[in-house]
């Protein structure tokens, strides 16, 4: 099977870090559990300049390397690789974040997963002249059987795959999201995700 996996808040606890960062930078106390929108500018009530500054700080290499792993992520991915499945990490991070992102994966025992930077969210707004390693036209030629994603804003990238099963990683900002089809299922953790994928791989 071919499996698509998002990076932030599926593999690592990015939003939990930003909750602390916005408190440190702007003295705004928005706990992780209160992050209602995937759009952090809206969730944290930031100005455009504040948002840009926060995102630049949060994408420094040493910061990207410090993000905590979501429990069970690397163990699950390696079990799929051991079974011969193809695992692709497709992140909305700009290509300037590729090397520390690759290093984070390697440090967490995920040396054998592929990593692509796809312009999902127009991130050029905070890192000027950003490059991305995967163009949309090439992404749309890729086939996946499963996708693990937390962002409702990314659902549109699955429209070209009508049989794709999308496992939505349960997060505060997707609680009120309407799923596009019966192929979408909310999952609370990696144990649940692994069980679903493994049961259908038999």
Image (cartoon, helix red, strand yellow):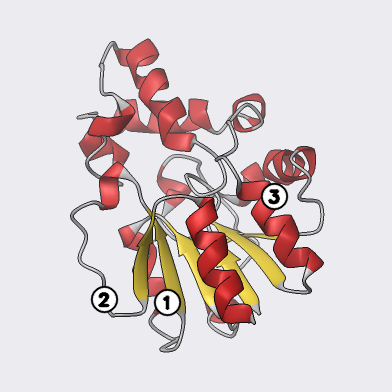
In the depicted structure, whether residue 143 falls above or below residue 57: below
The earlier-in-sequence mark between 3 and 1 is: 3
In the depicted structure, whether residue 175 falls above or below residue 133: above
Residue holding disc 1 = 158
Mark 1–mark 2 Cα distance, whole angstroms, equals 10 Å
Local secondary structure at mark 3: helix
Give the label on residue 75, or none: 3
Residue holding disc 2 = 180
Residue nearer the viewer, 16 or 50: 16
Task: Give yes or no for contact between labels 1 and 2 (Cβ–Cβ under 8 Å).
Answer: yes
Q: In the image, what residue occupies the spot 28% across and 80% down?
A: 181
Task: Give yes or no for contact between labels 3 and 2 (Cβ–Cβ under 8 Å).
Answer: no
Camera-nearest label, 3 or 1: 3
Residue nearer the viewer, 117 or 194: 194
Give the label on residue 135, or none: none
The earlier-in-sequence mark between 1 and 2 is: 1
Neighbour class for label 1 at 10 Å: few (<14), some, many (≥20)? some
Instruction: Residue 136 in the image: state x and y as whole percent.
Output: 52, 74
In the depicted structure, whether residue 178 falls above or below residue 58: below
């Amino acid at each position: 099977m071919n499996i698509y996996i998002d990076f932030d808040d599926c593999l690592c606890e990015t939003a939990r870090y930003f909750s602390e960062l916005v408190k440190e930078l702007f003295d705004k106390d928005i706990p992780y559990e209160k992050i209602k929108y995937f759009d952090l500018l809206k969730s944290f009530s930031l100005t455009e300049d504040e948002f840009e500054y926060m995102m630049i700080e949060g994408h420094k290499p040493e910061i990207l390397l410090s993000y905590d792993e979501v429990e069970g992520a690397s163990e699950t991915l390696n079990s799929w690789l051991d079974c011969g499945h193809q695992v692709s990490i497709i992140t909305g991070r700009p290509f300037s974040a590729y090397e520390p992102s690759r290093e984070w994966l390697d440090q967490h025992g995920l040396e054998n997963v592929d990593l692509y930077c796809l312009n999902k969210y127009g991130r050029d707004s905070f890192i000027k002249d950003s490059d991305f390693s995967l163009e949309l036209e090439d992404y749309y030629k890729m086939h996946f059987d499963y996708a693990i994603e937390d962002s409702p804003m990314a659902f549109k990238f699955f429209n070209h795959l009508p049989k794709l099963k999308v496992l939505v990683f349960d997060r505060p900002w997707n609680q009120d999201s309407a799923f596009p089809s019966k192929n979408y299922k909310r999952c609370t953790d990696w144990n649940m995700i692994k069980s679903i994928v493994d049961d259908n791989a038999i």
